[in-house]
Every structure is written in C-alpha cells, then in structure tokens.
Image: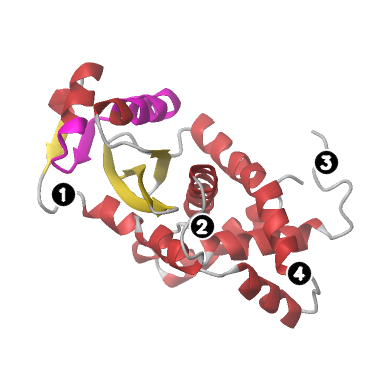
Amino acid sequence: MRNPFRYFKTSPEIIRLAVMMYVRFPLSLRNVEDLLHERGIDITHETVRFWWNRFGPLFARSIRKPRVLDGQYSNWAWHLDEVFVRINGELHYLWRAVDHEGEVLEAYVTKTRNRKAALKFLRKAMKRYGRPDVVVTDKLRSYKSALRELGIAGRQATGRWLNNRAESSHQPLRRREKIMTRFRSMQSLQKFAAVQSSIHNHFNLERHFYRRDDFKKNRTQALAEWRQLAA
C-alpha cells in the first residue's frame, strides 16, 4: 500500500489526532487549531480542513472494510430514520440505518423522501450488509412500499417508541450541524456523515455494558488501533 503521508512534513500522529478531534467531537476548525496550539502544534484551521477532507474518507474506509468483511455488525434489527437538513435554504433528507447495538450502518443524502429514495437507500445498505431480520421504521409510507418491492415487507415493525435507537443516534450529527452553522452542499453532508459514522462506530464502546476496568481496556485498544490507521 502506498504511504498516504509520504509528502507531508507533519507526522501522521498529529494528522490522525487533528482528524479525530474534528470529526469525533463537536468542535469547529478553529477549536481544533486552538487545542493543538496548547499542545505545541502550530497549524491553521485551514490545515485542519485540508487534513480531514484528505484523510477522513481514508480513515473511514480503513475502519469500515474489516468490520464488513468480519461481520462485526448485527442483522437482527435495523432502525431506519431520516434527518431533515437544510442546505442553502433547501430541505434535504439524510437517511440513516442503525443496528440494535447503536452501530451506524449506512448514511445516504437525497433531495426527496419518497419510495424511490427509500428503495435506493435500502438497496445500498443491503448490498453491503445483507438483509436484516427486522426493520424498525416510523410510519412513513415510503418504507412500506420499498420493503414490499424488496420482498421483506413482513419484517417491518413500527411503533411509537420502537425507533428510539435511531432517534438517539442523530444527536451527534445535530450537534455537528450547529457547530458548522449548517452544511453547504449535499456532497459535504454525504462525505461528513460517512466519515463520522465510521469513526463513531470505532469509538462506540457501549460503556454502560462494561465494568470500569474493562471499559478502560477497550478504550485503550480502540485508541491504539486508531493510531495505526493507514500506517
């Protein structure tokens, strides 16, 4: 594999740290610049922007590929929901699929919220992960129509509180949208949502399931694996 850091004077460790801080936490570019400055790293916010655009998708692929190949996700139940996002005053929809453990499986941006968009989103997700046993959705008719065309309408489940898992998973993106004062284009939203989803999955340690000692070990291991991405 060609070294992606080959022509960069900055060390890969600093680049990984900057990208992680910007994508994982609700920080602005200038926030990251100030935090790195406190650590003796003198860069501009535009450098942070360049790094995340250049290396964010690379890191996301490095995280996602082994998880898909090794089956490190669950098809027991998928929770589907849409996020309403305004881009330059125009309403867009970010479709998201989350499994019952909080793993973000897929994120897809469209201009419409109809059967065609739902079908395209579901096909995209199933091509990568296979078919789920249960599909939890809200009562949007587009889901029912798309699932019927895919032949799994009988696996759909709807209910007032059933989709709380998907609703809760929207919160990091909403915080990011507020910090960025909204997204500027569909491409930037799609790119950021895909990168953020992979990094969220990598650091999603479900701390409420583990004792403190085990959680600390899992956190240390996740951080060590992050530092080896694209090595």
Which mark, residue 162? 1
Viewer-nearest residue: 104 or 146: 146
Q: Provide the residue designation for mark 4.
A: 44
Specify whether 144 is left or right of 55: left
For badge 4, the amino acid type reads Thr
Residue 151 appears in the rendering? no
Residue at figure coordinates x 31%, y 36% from the top left: 112
Viewer-nearest residue: 140 or 126: 140
Q: Quadrant of residue 107?
A: top left
For badge 3, the amino acid type reads Asn
Disc with the residue nearer the chain's start (3 vs 2): 3
Q: Nearer the viewer, mark 4 or mark 3?
A: 4
Q: CA distance from mark 3 to mark 1?
A: 45 Å
Task: Locate residue 151, reporting x and y percent.
Answer: 21, 17
Q: Nearer the viewer, mark 2 or mark 1?
A: 1
Q: Provide the residue designation for mark 3.
A: 3
| Discs 1, 4 touching: Cβ within 8 Å | no
Task: Locate residue 120, reporting x and y percent.
Answer: 36, 26
- Please rate how many residues cluster around mark 4, counting C-alpha atoms within 10 Å: few if below 14, some from 14 to 19, many from 20: some
Q: CA distance from mark 4 to mark 3?
A: 24 Å
For badge 1, the amino acid type reads Leu
Which mark, residue 196? none
Element at label 1: loop
Disc with the residue nearer the chain's start (4 vs 3): 3
Q: Provide the residue designation for mark 2.
A: 203
